Amino acid sequence: MLLTLLFLVGCAAAPPQPAPPRWPEEFPTPEQLFEGHLAAIGGREAVLAQRVRAVDGRILLDGAKGIFLATRPSPDQLHILAAFPNGLFLEEGFDGQAGWARDPTGRRLHHDALEGLARRADLHRDANWRDWVAETEGPYPSSCDEGSRAERRCWRLEVTWTDHRRSELFFEVETGLQVASWNHPTGDGAPTRVEERRWVWFEGVRTSTHTVASSDTGVTETFIEALSGYAEGGEVMLPQDLRPVSRTVSVPLTNAGGFLTLPVAVDGVLTPALFDTGSSVHTLDAALSAVEGLNTGGEGVGGVVEGLALAPLPPLALGDWTLPEGGGVLTGDRFVPLGADLLLGAAPLSLGRVTLDLVDNRLRIEPPGGPVPEDAAPMRLGEGGLPEIEVTVGSRKMWALVDTGAPRTVLNWMAAAALGRAIGDPEVGRAGDLVGVGGFPVPAHAATVSGLAIGARPLPEAELLFALPPVLQRRFGSQPAALLGLDLLWGKVLVMDAFAGRAWIER
């Protein structure tokens, strides 16, 4: 596999798309983003000086240029930096032992799935690079256009090896996952090897299938590869494996000032909790942490980063169902409004079919199974178990993070362009700032729009916010086109079934 960060540029033939939005003058350019991050790690010269080999090039997104830099500080290490033209910045690497990436706050995270970066380091060792190839004609592997994903766009990257073999590597735009590689012979009779990768649910665990076909044997093999969660400092923060409930769990939801709260038992004691599916971890505030005997200097508690300390949490339960064990964070002051002492993250989404009923104000979790509407939309649990749903934006399909901790829906400017909106349009007004990556303010604009849908159900017309992607990037390695907040969900019943990989509006 090659770079997970190559997920924002497409190359499959597609119908004409709206013109990309104009780059707002008040936003930093990709060059400024890139140089700013380079400066934070010692500057360009320092980075290039330590390289064994570097790839320094450009990437394209809808006709706009971004910047990519990969260096190898030593033969078994890899350091990747990229600034995309829509404002996203990614940093990841392989340290000789394991893969790592930085989340938007700058914290260094280790991830089992990033062990593939070891193979990428090997690829960098032997490969001579050609130009990036994007938005070109096919043919493309079936995994780039199968079924309902006919408009799926893929990166295509050409690599010429030192033995003159040529490879074509394909990456899904929305996920950054390599979906296929075509290795072409050198002309001396060497076999052609074709690989395709698909993401599936297998026996309750999110996995990928890896299919390899070789022209010399005529044999096609399929492998199942399990995925696990991600960790920081060696401590697992949230398991990715699914542990379904065996009976229905139902708890009341309360609209508390535009946020959702629900009762959670902490060590058997009910406490109000803010329900935030945009968070990959649970969080206890200082008062409840002290009651539980936890503090930032206590035994078993990890180091403090950005005011948060990683720790194992006491048993948590929804109704009569105890949640799977998992790490969480402690904070030094009351972090949630409305008197809540706990922030409950997205873990319930991995327990079964989840119904967010904002008509009768209930959260229901049912065992997996049961009928799924034919017009349901694809959904997935991304890194950290955060729920993402494929939504229709104008005439395009895009991924949206369902964030019950966000009172407002936010679209990036690519999604805004799909709705015919751009900065400078008379109906698009300035709407203040949003808190972006690292706590920095991100300029936001607003306009009343329609044209969003989940499956066959349109979402109501509403005033939506438009902003640069960093405000949407709630975890490393992913960037949804939209953050779907509560403003579009009030008065609706949203069903999310991670086991079926589908979501729909029931009423």
Image (cartoon, rainbow, N blue to C red):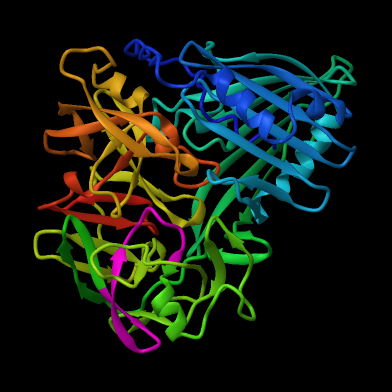
The residue sitting at 26% across, 54% down in the picture is 372
Q: Name the foreground residue: 4 vs 196.
A: 4
Q: Give the range drawn in magenta.
A: 263-282
Q: Which residue is drawn at 14% across and 59% down?
A: 358
In the displayed structure, does residue 451 sit left or right of residue 23? Answer: left
For residue 43, side relative to residue 107 (left or right):
right
Is 267 covered by the magenta stretch? Answer: yes
Report x, y in % for residue 171.
58, 30
Residue placed most toward the observer, 428 or 248: 428
Residue that appears at 48% across and 26% down: 87
Q: Which residue lies furthest to the bottom in this view?
A: 268
In front here: 218 or 114?
A: 114
Q: Position of residue 325 (x, y in %)?
A: 50, 76
Q: Residue at x 41, y 56 (%)?
A: 279
Question: Which secondary structure type mostly characterizes the magenta part of the structure?
Answer: strand
Q: In which quarter of the image is the N terminus?
A: top right
Query: Can the viewer see residue 158 in this picture?
Result: yes
Q: Can residue 369 be seen? A: no
Q: Where is residue 30 in the image (x, y as percent from the top left)?
A: 54, 20
Residue 362 sits above or below residue 30 on the image: below
> Between residues 278 and 8, which one lies in front from this camera angle?
278
In the shown orientation, is residue 441 left or right of residue 451? right
